[in-house]
Image (tube, helix red, strand yellow):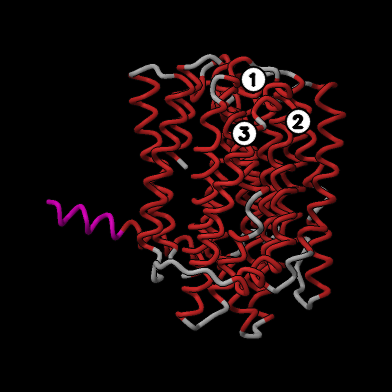
Amino acid sequence: MVFGLLGTVVVARHLPAEVFGTFILLQVVAEFLARISGFGLDLSISKFITSSEDECERRSIINTVLYFRFFVIFVVSIVALLASPLLTLMFGSSLLLGFIAFLPILFSLQSLNQLLNGTLQGFFLFKTIGTVQLLSSSLNFLFILILVLVLDQGVPGLVYARASSMAIACIFAYIRAPFEKQLEFHAAILKRVLLFGLPLQINDILTFVFLRIDTLMIGALLGPAEIAYYEIARKIPESLTGFYEAFRAVYFPFASRLFALGERIRVSQMLNNSIRLISFASIFGALIALVFGNDILRLLFSEKYLPSVPIFVLLMVGMNLSVTEYTFGYSLVAIGESDKPLIVNVVRTTVSLLGNVFFIPLFGVVGAAIANVASNLMTSPLDIFFLRRKQIPASIMNYLKPILVFAVLGVFFILVMPYILVSKIVIIALFSTSCILLSVITVDDLIVVTKEARSVFSKLVRKANSLN
């Protein structure tokens, strides 16, 4: 996540906005292809691995799904190349035309990476997942420095950096996955996994449409340069979402396991505590963006991207709403309700599409961020309704209280605009105090944080002493 942000800093300062936006567009199309051809297998494979104790069955599931994925990658890559004239017609970018040949490479590695990540989740290998992600992001940053900053390769350099780092990470993940690698394929197993994954596949497509339709519409209506401004605003919330992905990788298999054991109360407790802390942390980030947004973007990406500040703030609010909804949605899948996130996503995607069509022509790039927030507002109440029907009492107030505190302080900041540093710090302090008084942050939370901080500090001191 840190390396991803640093890589964007280097690219944003070194390349023209239009060139950077063209690469983003290429990457988004590759991600779209991975989503529409995933068949819900990335999440299904994790669910099936955690639900089985038979090593032979696990091996058969993984090998069958893996070889099916290779076949799908081959077919989709050919179709993507044949359909390349359609892309240039849609986005009208002469820059894009020269780089369409890179599309199958990015798509193939993206698709394979997602499946291997789901496999590792099924085995609860969270440290390995972290290592894979660190390897991919650090190598990508290193290759960007060499190919883009030193050799000045532009978009090809960005593609080579991304592809090389993902390829190495995929090889490492495949080697570390603890199953017997052999050539086998079982049609009955594939049918069972595909039937479970079908709602997840549709949900995956809708999730992509919600997450990335704004980028595609900005590219079609405004151009690649505007994509760059939107991507800069998106980069920090997207990087922070990486922390959520680390949490989700742990949360989902544990919730699945607890529900399989009949522990509904523990599933509910884990869900509500997670929602409370996730909502507090993410909306606190939105408050930081509101108060210090100008300083953050100027420091990281230079003054030419200051028009991205309002987009940055809105997308941070959207991130708060989306990670909350994701947690509800993954909880529904964990308890076997894989069709319910699909219903929720239909609502969210419909609002997102209509919002982008309406707001982008009116407000430009900011309109896409407004549509993001509007569509995210519609989803969590539906998730809570479905969870409660399955006797999982999800609490709406756990995530609503910190958002209301943010809204009050945000309105005050916008009206008064206290540019003095002391005033900004007071707003941050008021938010934290209000959340403690409203029990968003509890005494038990503070005790745990203090204990963990002491533990980390003690380890650092012991390490420093050992070096001396």
Task: Using the numbered discs, state the Cα–Cα distance from disc 2 to disc 3 in whole angstroms.
Answer: 11 Å
What residue is rendered at 64% in x and 83% in y? 263
Task: Using the numbered discs, state the Cα–Cα distance from disc 1 to disc 3 in whole angstroms.
Answer: 15 Å
What residue is rendered at 64% in x and 66% in y? 273
Report if residue 465 lies within the magenta region: yes
Q: Which residue is mark 1?
A: 224
Which amino acid type corresponds to the residue marked 1 in the rendered image? Pro
Magenta residues (range): 458-468
Q: Which residue is mark 2?
A: 368
Above or below residue 367? Residue 134 is: below
Task: Using the numbered discs, state the Cα–Cα distance from disc 2 to disc 1 in whole angstroms.
Answer: 15 Å
Q: Which residue is mark 3?
A: 234
Which amino acid type corresponds to the residue marked 3 in the rendered image? Arg
Q: Earlier in the sequence, mark 1 or mark 3?
A: 1
Q: Earlier in the sequence, mark 2 or mark 1?
A: 1
Looking at the rendered structure, the secondary structure element under dot 3 is helix
**Residue 410 place in picture, x, y as percent:** 73, 36
Which amino acid type corresponds to the residue marked 2 in the rendered image? Ala
**Residue 225 place in picture, x, y as percent:** 63, 17
